[in-house]
Amino acid sequence: MASGLTAAQINQITTTLSPARIATFQAAAGFTPAADVAEKYSWHALTSGAFFVSLHMCEVAVRNGVDAALTATYGPDWPWQAVFENSLPNPAGQHFKPQSELRRARAKFAAGATGKVIAELKFAFWCHLFTRRYQSRVWDPHIKNAFPNLPPAFTPIQARQAIHDKLDPLRKFRNRIAHHEPILGEPLPARKQSIESLVTWRCAEVANWHSSWETISHNMGIKP
C-alpha cells in the first residue's frame, strides 16, 4: 500500500477516526489507483491546513481593507458610531445578525479599541459588508482606496460584487476546514485563485510575499 501501513494499522485508524469518515476517503475520486485511504487522508489534512494558513492572510487583508473604508466613512471609532450600528440589519429569524454581532464584539472592549473589535468580529460580518446595502455610503467613495489593485475597468458596483463573489464562498470553505469537514468536492484551484485575487486587490506586495511561502501549491502538486 502506498502509505506503507499495514491493513491492521489502517483498520485501527479507521476505528479511531470513524468508519463513516474514512469511507468518504475510500470512495474519493481524483487520486491515483495506488493511493490507499491513509495516504488520501493525510494529504487531505495537510492540504486543508495549507489552505487555512492562506485564508488567514486573506481574511486579515480584507478586513483591514474594510476597516480603511469604514474609518473613512465613520471615523476611527466606527464600531461605536450609532449611525453605523443603525445601518446594520438585525433580521428576526435569521442565524446571523450583523448588528448583534457588532454589539457582541464591541462589548468586550473599551471604546476606541477598534483593532481588538476587528479581530473579534466573525468572517461573516466582513462578507455581509460587501452586500449592496453599503454601496452608496461606503463603497462608491472608498472601494478603490481600500482595494487599490482592483481591475481598473471595474466600477465601484462591479468591484464590490467581485469581492463578495469571491469572499462568501471562501467563508463557507473556511468553516468546513475549521470543523474538519472534507473539502474533496471543493474546486481547490478556484479557491486558491480567489485567495490570491483578494490579497492582491488589497496589496500586491503582501500577495507577492504570501506566494513565496504558501504551501497550497506544493500540496496540490503532490496529490497521491
Image (cartoon, rainbow, N blue to C red):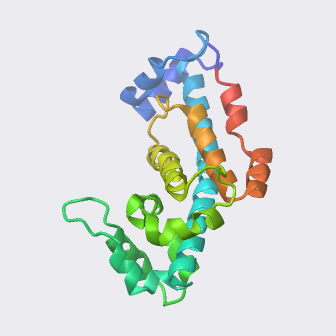
Horizontal side of residue 192 vs 167, given as left or right: right
In the depicted structure, whether residue 49 falls above or below residue 123: above
Name the one closer to the observer, 115 or 167: 167
Rendering coords of residue 185 (x, y %): 46, 28
Rendering coords of residue 80 (x, y %): 44, 86
Quadrant placement of the N terminus? top right
Q: Residue at x 61, y 62 (%)?
A: 60
Quadrant placement of the C terminus? top right
Name the one closer to the observer, 76 or 50: 76
In the depicted structure, whether residue 68 falls above or below residue 212: below
Q: Which of the 4 image quadrants contains residue 4? A: top right
Name the one closer to the observer, 50 or 86: 86
- Residue 186 visible, this angle: yes
Horizontal side of residue 62 vs 170, given as left or right: right
Q: Residue at x 44, y 34 (%)?
A: 17
- Residue 108 visible, this angle: no
Name the one closer to the observer, 164 or 209: 164
Q: Residue at x 80, y 46 (%)?
A: 212
In the depicted structure, whether residue 154 falls above or below residue 183: below
Rendering coords of residue 20 (x, y %): 36, 27
